[in-house]
Image (cartoon, rainbow, N blue to C red):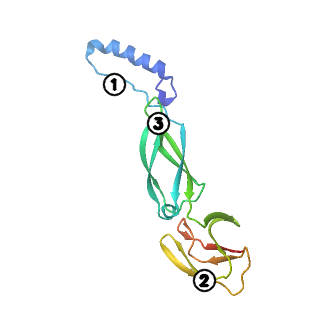
């Protein structure tokens, strides 16, 4: 009749109470069955906004929900619109068990930078516009700078691929794509 073996919890508790009454005169202690807390399948949803540097390097972030303040670890290399689920960080149910926390990653991008879908992956793109004359320039990503040498022939909407200088995701270095704009 034990609930862990498929028995009914209420019937088992009544059986233990009756057994304790019978043994009461014998001064034998029988452990009282305490039901296990029911799992909390409730999910709390939040958005977390990161700078590009925080996304590159990972960070700790304070999150707030109705049960209070928690600190979560955001791993390095997260992508925009990625969802990370933290078990045991959500809101608490009536049994005191925490549910899941579902975190949607959003980015606060520096001027000129965007994440865009290219072929089958999301890549970091830096857009630069030239008014009169196309010149070499320097771009900084995650506190590293690189001089971009412009080719002799450029056109509006042209992309340059800068190898191993873009976003690092899952330990893989992706290229930075530079979009050229001409006025």
- Checking the image for residue 31, the label placed there is 1
Q: List x then y, in percent, for residue 32.
A: 36, 23
Dot 1: what SS? loop
Assess whether mark 3 and mark 1 are in contact (beta carbons under 8 angstroms).
Answer: no
Residue of label 3: 66
Label 2 crowd bin: few (<14), some (14–19), many (20+), radius 10 Å: few
Left or right: 41 with respect to 116?
A: left
Residue of label 2: 136
C-alpha distance separating marks 3 and 2? 52 Å
Foreground pick, 169 / 13: 169
Residue drawn at the location 47% of the way across and 60% of the way down:
58
Residue drawn at the location 29% of the way across and 13% of the way down:
24
Label 3 crowd bin: few (<14), some (14–19), many (20+), radius 10 Å: few
Q: List x then y, in percent, for residue 144.
A: 49, 74
Vertical order, 38 against 83 (above or below):
above
Dot 3: what SS? loop
Q: Earlier in the sequence, mark 1 or mark 3?
A: 1
Vertical order, 141 against 93 (above or below):
below
Q: Earlier in the sequence, mark 2 or mark 1?
A: 1
**Camera-nearest label, 1 or 3:** 3
C-alpha distance separating marks 1 and 3? 36 Å
C-alpha distance separating marks 2 and 1? 79 Å
Left or right: 17 with respect to 144?
A: left
Q: Earlier in the sequence, mark 3 or mark 2?
A: 3
Dot 2: what SS? loop
Foreground pick, 133 / 124: 133
Residue drawn at the location 42% of the way across and 43% of the way down:
69
> In which quadrant of the rendered view does residue 14 lie?
top left
Left or right: 74 with respect to 82?
A: left
The quadrant of the picture occupied by the C terminus is: bottom right
Q: List x then y, in percent, for residue 135.
A: 62, 83
Residue drawn at the location 68% of the way across and 76% of the way down:
131
């Amino acid at each position: 009749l034990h609930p862990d073996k498929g028995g009914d919890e209420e019937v088992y508790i009544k059986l233990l109470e009756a057994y304790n009454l019978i043994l009461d005169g014998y001064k034998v202690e029988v452990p009282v069955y305490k039901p296990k807390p029911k799992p909390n399948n409730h999910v709390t949803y939040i958005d977390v906004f990161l700078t590009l540097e925080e996304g590159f390097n990972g960070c700790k972030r304070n999150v707030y929900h109705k049960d209070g303040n928690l600190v979560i670890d955001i791993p390095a290399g997260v992508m925009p619109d990625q969802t990370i689920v933290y078990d045991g960080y959500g809101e608490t149910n009536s049994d005191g068990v925490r549910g899941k926390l579902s975190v949607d990653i959003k980015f606060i991008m520096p001027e000129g930078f965007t994440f865009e879908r290219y072929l089958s992956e999301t890549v970091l793109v830096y857009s630069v516009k030239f008014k009169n004359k196309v010149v070499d320039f320097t771009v900084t990503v995650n506190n590293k700078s690189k001089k971009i040498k412009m080719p002799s022939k450029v056109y509006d909407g042209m992309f340059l691929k800068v190898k191993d200088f873009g976003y690092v995701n899952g330990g893989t270095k992706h290229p930075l794509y530079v979009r050229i704009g001409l006025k």
